Amino acid sequence: VSSKREAIVYGELDPSKGKLASLIDSYGHVNVTDPNNGQGTVTVPSNITVEGYYPKMLSDLERLSSTFIEVFNTVHKAGHPLDYAGLTDLNSDGTVDADDFKEFNVFEIVDGKVKVNQSIVDNPSLLAASSVENEEGNGKWAIEIANLQYI
């Protein structure tokens, strides 16, 4: 946008301009006040928010995935895995044990994508399926994790 005010001002759009207004509403727009009334350069603040249906939907999905990951990891840490093989000494106390498991996250967000911890991929026995430590065949905690879908 040059200093000659070539930008489309959202507030000045005629609501009857259906397709253009619809596209702008969908894909998003930024409301910036021009303190110079079109004379000179407008500095766009770094903390701007984009308004529109798609940007809001993406923001809501990001918040949903972050909340799900946080809740899932918290519930998972309250259970017990079959073994701790492949788990690293996360609390740096020299041993790999249940205390390290409490620091372990199944899911994480990497570059905007939800990723399963590689340790789980390499050793599915790290999934906390049991409600009691060292009790093979106890899948009670797996049911608790599955019930997260109803929250």
Image (spheres, rainbow, N blue to C red):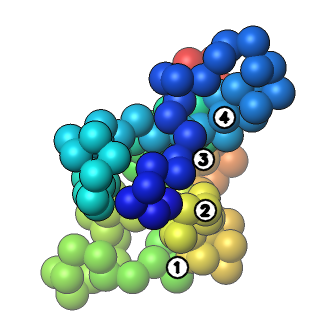
Asked whether residue 72 appears in the rendered view, the answer is: no
Give how far across and how far down residue 85 sits, in percent.
Answer: 52, 79
**Residue linked to disc 3:** 129
**Residue linked to disc 2:** 113
**Residue linked to disc 1:** 85
In the image, 43: left or right of 88?
left
Residue at (31, 81) in percent of width and height: 89
Q: Earlier in the sequence, mark 3 or mark 1?
A: 1
Few, some or many residues within 10 Å of mark 3 (<14, 14–19, 20+)? many
Few, some or many residues within 10 Å of mark 4 (<14, 14–19, 20+)? some
Instruction: Tell us which disc is closer to us: 2 or 3.
Output: 2
Q: Earlier in the sequence, mark 2 or mark 3?
A: 2
Residue at (58, 31) in percent of width and height: 52
Q: Determine the CA span between mark 3 and mark 1.
A: 15 Å
Q: Amino acid at mark 1?
A: Ala
Instruction: Tell us which disc is closer to us: 4 or 1.
Output: 4
Q: Does the residue at mark 4 contact the one at mark 3 (Cβ under 8 Å)? A: no
Query: For numbered disc 2, what is the local secondary structure?
Result: strand
Q: Which mark is residue 24?
A: 4
Instruction: Tell us which disc is closer to us: 4 or 3.
Output: 4
Q: Amino acid at mark 3?
A: Ala
Q: Does the residue at mark 3 contact the one at mark 1 (Cβ under 8 Å)? A: no
Q: Amino acid at mark 4?
A: Ile
Q: Earlier in the sequence, mark 4 or mark 2?
A: 4
Q: Does the residue at mark 1 contact the one at mark 2 (Cβ under 8 Å)? A: no
Query: For numbered disc 1, what is the local secondary structure?
Result: loop
